[in-house]
Image (cartoon, helix red, strand yellow):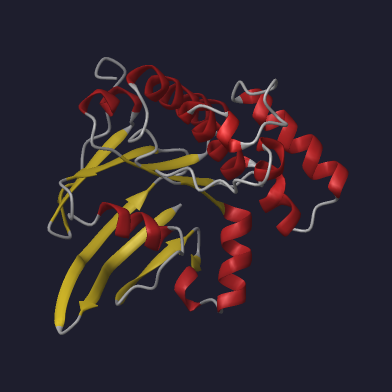
Amino acid sequence: MITVEDLERVYLMGKVEVHALRGVSLSVKQGEFLGVTGESGSGKSTLLHLVGILDQPTAGRVLIDTTDVYRLSAEEQSRFRLGRIGFVFQEYALIQELTALENVYLPSLAAGNSHRDHEEHAGAILEKVGLEGRLNHLPRELSGGEQQRVAIARALVNDPGILLADEPCANLDSENSRNIMDIFADINRETGQTIMMVSHEAWHRPYFDRIIRLRDGRIVDAGDVFDDEER
């Protein structure tokens, strides 16, 4: 479903070139829960942002199904991303003036769905992540774990085939982290959504179908598919 070919990303820091990705190639199968690991600065977030069409590669390409996403116009990329990809950020990225329900249905509204449809669907997803009693609370009235669940619900509201998560447990305690990982596992198992998740935590391993490891902008371990005894 996701094919990355010879992906490079070079940033200019003054007169210095920083090579965030150096010819990365990989394939992610439909319905796979893929973990992306590596030291800080290895290129994990850059890879996720390029797959999610949130940046522009210096070279290479990203295909989702058969669509070469970086050959689309900017408007086409926005529509494609809105309908096909959900993104969960480390910092939640919620709009502080909006309730949990409003934060979740905002992408659905942007996609052109009716007010009744997007509100009902957003409420159903918030219920799925255990927030049925918190729909009308503002982010400042929610715990960190609850805010991250709102962010997950927002990423799911347009029923994307791909869910990208950039260290979604980094700011959470161990109990909330495990709750978030369980939600991702349930989503993957019940809906068959493809998930790519950046992680630093060794205890996340059993949740993943496969793990790739990056170092200095290159894949150094493409990972094996885990069998049921390893997970």
Q: Is residue 25 left or right of residue 220?
A: right
Query: In the image, is residue 231 above or below residue 109?
Result: above
- Of residues 223 and 20, the one nearer the viewer is 20
How far across and how far down the image is residue 6, in percent?
Answer: 26, 68
Q: Is residue 111 left or right of residue 161?
A: right
Q: For the point 56% across and 35% down, which residue is it? A: 140
Q: How many marks?
A: 0
Q: Quadrant of the C terminus?
A: top left
How far across and how far down the image is residue 154, in percent?
Answer: 61, 42
Q: Residue furthest bottom?
A: 15
Query: In the image, is residue 141 above or below residue 216?
Result: above
- Of residues 198 and 102, the one nearer the viewer is 102
Q: For the point 69% across and 50% down, which residue is it? A: 106
- Of residues 60 and 56, the one nearer the viewer is 56
- Of residues 129 and 218, the one nearer the viewer is 129
Q: In the rendered image, which quarter is residue 90 located in? A: top left
Q: Is residue 222 left or right of residue 154?
A: left
How far across and how far down the image is residue 206, in percent?
Answer: 29, 22
